[in-house]
Image (cartoon, helix red, strand yellow):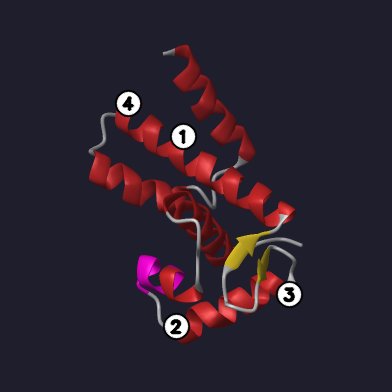
Amino acid sequence: MAIYESGEDYLETILVLHKRNDIVRSIDVASELGFSKPSVSRAMSILKKDGYISMDEKGHISLTEDGQKAAENIYERHNNISKFLIEILGVSEENALKDACRIEHDLSNETYGRICEALIKR
């Protein structure tokens, strides 16, 4: 099942929150992203239905195997694009992080591969 940009953002946020805290709840995701609790609740039900997350009886969110793979992929893209913008192009860290959030979803695999090559060659 294809994940849309917003779904990728949620998965990436869940991954980051899991790295920061062991337990992740919808309220944590809402707080991190600055979204309303109903919006996050709806997104979590879609991600759960699509098999990317599971929730226990206490509302703790876990990434499934597919969710973990998708989250790690988008997280890696975000980090590499940010690094490229900062280290190769000289963009400020603040702008690079914001721009990477926008770019990571729409960048072709070919262009992303070239970015990774440029980072390795330097």
Q: Residue at x 49, y 17 (%)?
A: 120
The answer to whether mark 4 and mark 2 are in CB contact below 8 A is no
Asked which quadrant contains residue 49, the reply is bottom right
**To which residue does mark 3 refer?**
49
SS class, disc 3? helix
Which residue is situated farthest in the bottom direction here?
38
Instruction: Determine crowd level at label 1: few under 14, some 14-19, many 20+ residues with C-alpha closer than 10 A.
Output: some
Q: How would you classify the magenta stretch by its main secondary structure?
A: helix
SS class, disc 4? helix
Amino acid residing under circle 4: Glu
Of labels 4 and 2, earlier in sequence is 2
The answer to whether mark 1 and mark 3 are in CB contact below 8 A is no
Amino acid residing under circle 1: Asn
Q: Residue 38: image x %, image y %?
A: 48, 86
**To which residue does mark 2 refer?**
37
SS class, disc 1? helix
Segment colored magenta: 29-34
Which residue is situated farthest in the top direction here?
121
**To which residue does mark 1 refer?**
80
Amino acid residing under circle 3: Lys
Q: Residue at x 41, y 82 (%)?
A: 36
Locate residue 89 relative to residue 120 in the image: left or right: left
Amino acid residing under circle 2: Lys
